[in-house]
Amino acid sequence: MSHNLVNTIYITHCVNADPEQHWYLWLEQQLKQMSVTVERVFLADASHPDSEIWHTCLEAQLKKLNEHSIVVAHGLSCVAVARFLTKKLQQKTIKAGVFIAPFHEPLPQHPELNLFIGHSPFDSGILRQNIQRRVVLFSSNDPIVPVPFSFKFSHMLNAQLIEVNQAGHFCAEDGYVEFSQLLQILQTLVKAELS
């Protein structure tokens, strides 16, 4: 039985990024030392994100989701992941969803993302019911995502809300080439036995 209990953590990157950037690779390396399986998900053409293409990327790379899976999403991928999981979790559950700087409404300074957001509806009821643990991290000085947007997203998912002081948008240019607070949260989730 025990081989089924292995957690797989999927890391999805933000807009204008790829799986090599920011803290994604560092996080994978840290988690692998705990013998956790980690997949960094590639979202195509991230400088011109398209909601259908990102949905297809998630479909292709998150095929094996199960009750031991943990999905980590950052920035715009929170929008894509929320929509994807709405479809994917009609009949199944996952262990946890960790959303970093999430939002689900048009960003005042980034109207070019409005179409993507508009095409990414999600069902908060399904996500609340079928993601066993839900966590939102937001930064006190995020230049891209207004703090109330992350609050609202967290509220819709009835998630645990964690403030990270002065973290910008959790990008390398904000000093986030490592992300120890996220690592600790994931270590706790991996160890948690969920009924």
Image (cartoon, rainbow, N blue to C red):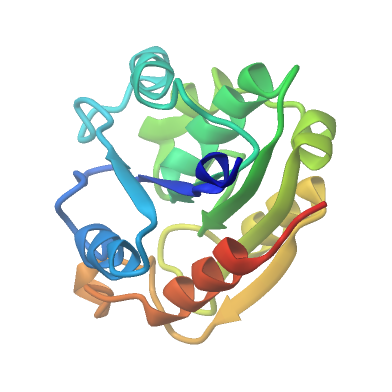
Q: Is residue 117 visible?
A: yes
Give the farthest residue toward the left. 20
Q: Position of residue 88 (x, y in %)?
A: 62, 20
Give the farthest residue toward the bottom. 165
In terms of image quadrants, where is residue 58? top left
Asked if 29 appears above or below 184 in the picture, the reply is above
Residue 152 vs residue 74, the one in the foreground: 74
Residue 56 vs residue 140, the one in the foreground: 56
Residue 135 vs residue 77, the one in the foreground: 135
Residue at figure coordinates x 60%, y 67% from the top left: 191
Residue at figure coordinates x 46%, y 71% from the top left: 182
Residue at figure coordinates x 61%, y 40% from the top left: 1
In terms of image quadrants, where is residue 106? top right
Q: Position of residue 54 (x, y in %)?
A: 36, 22
State left or right for residue 152 relative to residue 52.
right
Give the farthest residue toward the front. 1
Q: Position of residue 70 (x, y in %)?
A: 54, 47
Asked if 193 appears above or below 119 in the picture, the reply is below
State left or right for residue 92 relative to residue 107.
right
Q: Position of residue 103 (x, y in %)?
A: 58, 48
Question: Count of labels shown?
Answer: 0
Q: Is residue 108 visible?
A: no
Residue at figure coordinates x 22%, y 67% from the top left: 26
